[in-house]
Image: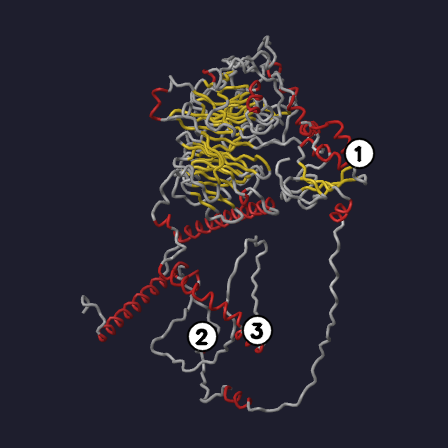
């Protein structure tokens, strides 16, 4: 039963599996919660479950107690805090059930007799001499009042005013100010001051570990409650108090002496200077807690991690691609390249190896079939893998049984040698002459809700399977690929997927594409106002959510459809004429370049004068970052919010506001290398730095600086950061460095548990920032127009003589003042020696 803890006799702790919870509609944190933990179960249903599943049933330990229960309904209670050792417990007596369902009401307080306050009757005034003090404090005029007369010359009545030019920059805020100053020639000494004094107790501050949700300034005035004089005298004269004081006085004196001689609360470890020593990789950080470390000296020695992804369905499995370091470039041809799969169960040995034709810089799992992967090579080719025959192996190494979304056929492990990692060959490789001419830096799958034609037009996806890939490269192109069979390609005989697949043979899933795979169409990125093209490194597009009946049905049956593995060799690219166009799909791309630019372009093709399809010029291009853009990621909560990171700063964009980002950070002292959004909190994202530190940002708490800065989390430059949502109470952050080390940190609750109405608050914040940007741009435009008009007016009109006379008069006054100041200082002997 797990924990052998003591519990009352009228209850029995139980462990209910997920299958039992679904059978009895008592799924934890869904059907039963901490606020509503009670669930009534029918006695007949429990007895029937015990008969059907026998010893496998979770209720078999309480079989006799259930049969002897006198009523028809038993109470099941969800114990979220494991008070009695398990997550559930069954109430075995009707009395205990009634006590839990109908707790006794608290006794009503006895109404106290309230005395009615009456207005006291007026009493005659009895003088005690206070009116004399009031008379003395009263202020009387002791001198005659001064009279002033102001007049104006008769000829100035009704005269036209004479205005002159004055620069607004000469005075503060554009207006004249007569500021007050202290005159040393006139001072009044204060001899007596009347002030009220109120006796109050000392102010003492205290704190508690509670969340201050509603902030409100308040003050409290109190007075101590004193004992009567007789009771105080009795306590001070009692023998018990005297004995107590005699007992504790020597101890208090000794403690005070020790505190005076040496501070007993100092940190000796910090004073010895050993805080900075030791291995930073194993050191527990203040915010993130190290959960797991993956190391492999055989495959990752002298290698750098270029890409990292969590497996979409299998718990605790992470896949990474590695590239050779700069010192080992000469041996690259002799060293094979792999994508390695690691698991929490065995952090020192990879569980699966994907063979690569060259070093991989980016790869991604298919959103509809997690067994299919696509990657981009350094030489510009695109690769496809199929790991469906090895899913059982990856699931079998987990500490607990976790079912994947795809049911596959297990392969024979007898042919694999003991302690040897299975190697999976790639299924298909694009044609070299039709691939990128530079390394592929980003690979993303189009969602299963739509597909695009050769002209870039979004149309409906009848297969409900992700079949198209988007890649980009610094060769100034974005390629769209389709993994289906072309209509011009003849059908080939192909074995069923997963049939007779040995661990060392290449799967034939995409045999129809191998060495002949060409892109569906190419999107070029010509510069807007100059010659040349932009060099993309990262891209981001909006995920389209289908609202049609077909799309909703596919989403509802997602679990069922995912169990059916599609045969990609039988899927053919349909004609664009037979598909329905989707006009409301956003076809815009955010692209980050190697020059720190953010390019906003449309992937739709346009026809030129001769009728040929070609890419149009990008819509906008802004230089916000100072170096390579390493992150372009759309928020998982807001489809129009994009985070970009590059150089020494990051920026947040809102689609539709492309003149400037709605939020831009200040330049950091350390180079920002990578970042990612939180998967559970809309206001939180993580940023990795070159010095191995991680910045945790919470926009609802601070916008000028990170909420937490964890310095030296890793003793090398951070290459990749990837968040993963394992469960409602377990969130991880995978971090990779230049030395081939993978560390998995557990995110603290403060950074994964969302606050109340956080999504609404962030939406309002982004709207306010958007309105601020629009107002600022409107003011700048108005000011530019106004300034341009003033400059033209100044050029057309000559300078007035009045202004010259005023400037000369000011100079004369200033010279007279300087001469007077010099003479005064000289007479007082305060003038410096060089002026005397």
Q: Quick one: quadrant of the N terminus? A: top right
Mark 2 touches mark 3? (CB < 8 Å): no
Q: Answer left or right for 375 relative to 669.
A: right
Closest to the camera, between mark 2 and mark 1, is 1
**CA separation, marks 2 and 1?**
109 Å
Q: Position of residue 630 (x, y in %)?
A: 45, 34
Measuring 68% from the left and 41% from the top, which residue is drawn there? Answer: 78
- Confirm whether residue 204 shows in the render: yes
Mark closer to the chain start, 2 or 3: 2
Kindly identify which residue carries mark 2: 156
Quarter the C terminus occupies: bottom left
Q: Is residue 135 above or below residue 405?
A: below
Q: Which of label 2 and label 3 is nearer to you? A: 3
Q: Secondary structure at mark 2?
A: helix
For label 1, the crowd category at 10 Å Cα-Cα, with few meaning under 14, some 14 to 19 and many 20 or more, is few
**Earlier-in-chain disc, 2 versus 1:** 1
For disc 3, the marked residue is 226
Q: Is residue 663 above or below residue 453?
A: below
- Decide which of 117, 661 is in the foreground and name it: 117
| Residue at mark 3 to residue at mark 1: CA–CA distance | 66 Å
Instruction: Pinpoint residue 746: horizontal percent, then vertical percent.
Output: 51, 38
Around disc 3, counting alpha carbons within 10 Å, would you say few (fewer than 14), some (14 to 19), or many (20 or more)?
A: few
Q: Which mark is residue 44?
A: 1
- Mark 2 crowdedness (10 Å alpha carbons): few <14, some 14-19, many ≥20: few
> What kind of element bears circle 1?
helix
User: Is 216 or 102 nearer to us in this picture?
Assistant: 102
* 35 to 541, vertically: above or below: below
* SS at badge 3: loop
244, 604: nearer the viewer: 244
Residue 709: x and y in percent read 44, 44
């Amino acid at each position: 039963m797990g924990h052998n803890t003591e519990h009352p006799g009228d209850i029995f702790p139980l462990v209910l599996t997920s299958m039992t919870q679904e059978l009895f509609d008592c799924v934890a944190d869904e059907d039963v919660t901490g606020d509503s933990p009670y669930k009534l179960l029918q006695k007949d249903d429990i007895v029937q479950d015990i008969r059907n599943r026998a010893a496998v049933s979770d209720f078999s330990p309480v079989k006799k107690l259930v049969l002897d229960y006198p009523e028809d309904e038993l109470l099941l209670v969800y114990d979220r805090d494991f008070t009695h050792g398990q997550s559930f417990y069954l109430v075995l007596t009707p009395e205990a059930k009634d006590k839990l369902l109908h707790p006794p009401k608290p006794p009503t307080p006895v109404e106290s007799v309230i005395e009615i306050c009456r207005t006291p009757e007026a009493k005659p005034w009895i003088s005690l001499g206070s009116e004399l003090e009031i008379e003395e404090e009263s202020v009387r005029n002791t001198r005659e009042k001064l009279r002033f007369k102001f007049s104006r010359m008769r000829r100035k009545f009704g005269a036209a005013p004479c205005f002159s030019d004055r620069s607004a920059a000469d005075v503060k805020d554009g207006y004249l100010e007569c500021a007050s100053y202290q005159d040393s020639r006139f001072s009044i000494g204060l001899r007596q001051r009347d002030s009220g004094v109120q006796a109050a107790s000392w102010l003492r501050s205290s704190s508690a570990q509670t969340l201050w949700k509603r902030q409100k300034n308040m003050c409290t005035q109190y007075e101590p409650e004193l004992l009567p004089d007789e009771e105080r005298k009795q306590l001070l004269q009692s023998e018990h108090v005297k004995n107590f004081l005699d007992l504790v006085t020597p101890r208090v004196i000794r403690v005070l002496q020790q505190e005076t001689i040496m501070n007993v609360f100092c940190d000796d470890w910090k004073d010895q200077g050993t805080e900075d020593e030791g291995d930073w990789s194993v050191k527990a950080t203040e915010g993130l807690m190290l959960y797991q470390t993956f190391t492999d000296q055989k495959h990752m020695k002298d290698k750098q991690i270029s890409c990292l992804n969590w497996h979409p369905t299998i718990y605790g499995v992470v896949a990474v691609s590695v590239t050779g370091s700069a010192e080992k470039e000469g041996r690259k041809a002799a060293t094979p390249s792999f994508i390695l799969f690691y698991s929490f169960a065995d952090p020192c040995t990879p569980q699966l190896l994907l063979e690569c034709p060259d070093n991989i810089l980016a790869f991604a799992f298919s959103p509809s079939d997690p067994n299919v992967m696509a990657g981009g090579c350094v030489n510009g080719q695109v690769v496809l893998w199929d790991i469906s025959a090895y899913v059982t192996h990856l699931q079998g190494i987990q500490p607990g049984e976790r079912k994947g979304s795809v049911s596959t056929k297990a392969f024979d492990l007898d042919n694999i040698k003991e302690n040897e990692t299975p190697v999976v060959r790639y299924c298909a490789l694009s044609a070299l002459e039709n691939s990128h001419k530079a390394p592929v830096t980003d690979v993303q799958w189009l969602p299963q809700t739509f597909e695009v034609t050769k002209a870039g037009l979004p149309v409906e996806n009848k297969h409900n399977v992700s079949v198209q890939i988007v890649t980009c490269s610094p060769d100034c192109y974005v390629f769209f690929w389709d993994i289906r069979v072309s209509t011009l390609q003849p059908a080939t005989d192909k074995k069923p997927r997963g049939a007779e697949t040995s661990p060392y043979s290449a799967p034939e899933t995409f045999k129809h594409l191998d060495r002949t795979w060409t892109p569906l169409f190419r999107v070029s990125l010509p510069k807007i106002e100059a010659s040349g093209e932009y060099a993309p490194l990262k891209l981001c597009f909006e995920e389209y959510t289908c609202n049609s009946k077909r799309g909703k049905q596919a989403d509802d049956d997602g679990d069922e459809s995912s169990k059916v593995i599609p045969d990609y060799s039988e899927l053919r690219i349909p004609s664009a004429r037979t598909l329905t166009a989707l006009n409301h799909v956003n076809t815009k791309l955010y692209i980050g370049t190697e020059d720190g630019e953010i390019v906003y372009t449309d992937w739709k093709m346009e026809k030129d004068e001769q009728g040929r399809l070609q890419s149009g010029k990008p819509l906008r291009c802004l230089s916000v970052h100072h170096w390579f853009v390493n992150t372009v990621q759309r928020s998982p909560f807001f489809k129009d919010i994009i985070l970009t990171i590059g150089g020494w700063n990051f920026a947040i964009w809102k689609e539709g506001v492309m003149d400037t980002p709605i939020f831009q950070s200040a330049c950091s002292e350390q180079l920002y290398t990578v970042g990612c959004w939180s998967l559970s909190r809309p206001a939180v994202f993580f940023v990795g730095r070159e010095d191995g530190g991680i910045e945790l940002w919470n926009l609802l708490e601070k916008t000028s600086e990170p909420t937490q800065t964890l310095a030296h989390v890793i003793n090398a430059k951070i290459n990749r950061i990837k968040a993963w949502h394992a469960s409602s109470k377990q969130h991880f952050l995978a971090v990779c460095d230049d030395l081939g080390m993978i560390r998995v940190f557990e995110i603290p609750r403060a950074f994964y548990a969302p606050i109340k109405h956080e999504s609404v608050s962030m939406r309002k914040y982004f709207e306010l920032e958007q309105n601020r940007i629009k107002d600022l741009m409107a003011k700048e435009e108005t000011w530019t127009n106004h300034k341009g008009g003033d400059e033209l007016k100044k050029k057309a009109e000559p300078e007035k003589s009045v202004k010259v006379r005023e400037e000369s008069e000011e100079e004369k006054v200033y010279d007279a003042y300087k001469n007077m100041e010099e003479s005064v200082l000289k007479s007082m002997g305060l003038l410096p020696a060089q002026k005397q």
